[in-house]
Image (cartoon, rainbow, N blue to C red):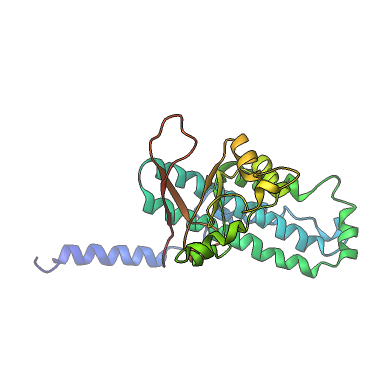
Amino acid sequence: MGLPNDDYIKGAAVECRQAAEKDFEEPVLAGHGDTDYARYMRTGALLSLQRVPEEMAHRDELMFQTVHQSTELWLKHACFEVEEAARQVAAGHLETAVRLLARASLGIELVTGQLEMLRHLSPWHFQTIRTVLGHGSGFESPGWRSVQAVSNGWLLYRTGWDRRVGDPASFLNGGHTPGVAPDCARWLAEHTPILGIGVETVGTDAGQAASFADQPFPCHWYFHQANKYGLTQLQRLAELPPQGALVVAGPLPIVDGSGSPARVLALVDRP
């Protein structure tokens, strides 16, 4: 490559002079606001969504609304990433899906982390705020409802029982192994969007589940009734994050069977 000629140098000088003459403080985007930042982020509309002091029943309403409104935004983002992750899994792009699920998981962590702010709201002051909430409740959150609708994840029940795998007698423990209580199993099966439950023990139910008076073998009974699944004898659950792992369960292609051996993998995004 040769050196720039005189015409190129003159043209570049003109462009630099024109750029220097531009007023970069003058917004170029359409919308409301004194700056492009305000127009793109819509800060005027965003910051007008909270009650003004004259409308507040208590000054802590700003904290209360800030926590809940930002929660809705993070949940919206988490659902957005989970939906795309599902499409990436269907397309066979597992690495991309794992990265997206890591984003969603971090969003949920931020949501739960910022709820600590509400510890600074006294019960007495909340009762004052409660008078202006109408019938409003966190159970009505559209963000949480959306998360439930798109999550369809696995509940992996970690007890540390996989440490006994090398000792058959200790692993079976005379039929005494940990498990889920009947009322909890029913609630998980009937009121959550999970695909199923995974455990480290030999069965999804507790070792003594056959003797449960209210419902023997509750995980089998309620989960199968709800068309949900069970995974057993999982290992290394302690190495997984609380949320965000991509679980791949590959059973044999058995027709009209009640169960199958399966190769179960959990993919996580490593930094």
The picture quadrant where one finds residue 35 is bottom right
Left/right placement of residue 51 relative to residue 5 reads: right
Q: Residue at x 66, y 49 (%)?
A: 209
Q: Residue at x 71, y 60 (%)?
A: 67
Task: Judge by depth and name the residue closer to the eye, 85 or 260.
Answer: 260
**Residue 165 in sight:** yes
Task: Judge by depth and name the residue closer to the eye, 229 or 221.
Answer: 221
Left/right placement of residue 90 relative to residue 193 reads: left
**Residue 32 in sight:** no
Relative to residue 189, is residue 234 depicted above or below?
below
Relative to residue 200, is residue 117 depicted above or below?
below
Which quadrant holds the C terminus? bottom left
Residue placed furthest toward the left: 2
Q: Residue at x 55, y 65 (%)?
A: 160
Q: Position of residue 113 (x, y in %)?
A: 65, 65
Left/right placement of residue 67 relative to residue 22 reads: right
